[in-house]
Amino acid sequence: MKEIIVKLKSYFYALEIIKINQCIKKENEWVISKQVLRSGTSIGANVEAADAGVSKRDFASKMSLASKEARETLYWLRLIKNSDLTSI
């Protein structure tokens, strides 16, 4: 059950990241928009990959990658907020 919740949350989080990315692209901040899109959407991709892991170690490795991508995304979102790149 926990895996389903994580999958759903990471999926809907990625959808929000896509929306944020569209707002940033309108401001012509291509580098940052690509970074936040890449890290924010890869969280869910790593969660999906973890679910298909062939071992507990493989599962843990993929979930660890998802966690790292989440931390990176948080960095980019803070940077966007504090630099006033967009009004979101």
Image: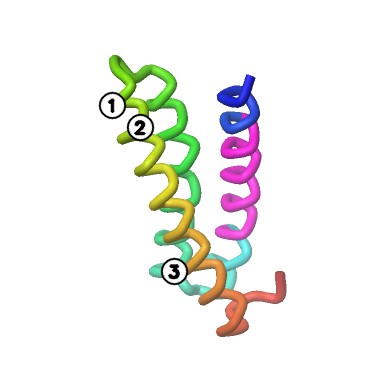
For the magenta stretch, what is the residue range? 8-21
Q: Report how far apart the C-alphas of labels 3 and 1 lie in the structure.
A: 33 Å
Regarding mark 1 in the picture, which secondary structure is present there?
Answer: helix
Q: Residue at x 58, y 52 (%)?
A: 17
List the single residue furthest toward the bottom.
83
Find out whether the residues at labels 1 and 2 contact each other: C-beta distance under 8 Å: yes
Q: Which residue is mark 2?
A: 60
Which residue is labeled 1 in the image?
57
Q: Nearer the viewer, residue 10 or 30?
A: 10
Which SS class for mark 3? helix
Q: Name the mark nearer the viewer: 3 or 1.
A: 1
Q: Which of the 4 quarters of the picture holds residue 77?
A: bottom right
Main SS category, magenta section: helix
Q: Earlier in the sequence, mark 3 or mark 1?
A: 3
Residues tagged 2 and 3 counted as in contact (Cβ below 8 A): no
Structural distance between the alpha carbons of marks 2 and 3: 29 Å
Q: Residue at x 29, y 17 (%)?
A: 55
Give the residue type that dot 2 points to.
Ala
Residue drawn at x 61%, y 25% is 2
Residue highlighted by disc 3: 32
Secondary structure at badge 2 equals helix
Q: Residue 62: x, y in percent?
A: 35, 34
Q: Nearer the viewer, residue 52 or 38?
A: 52
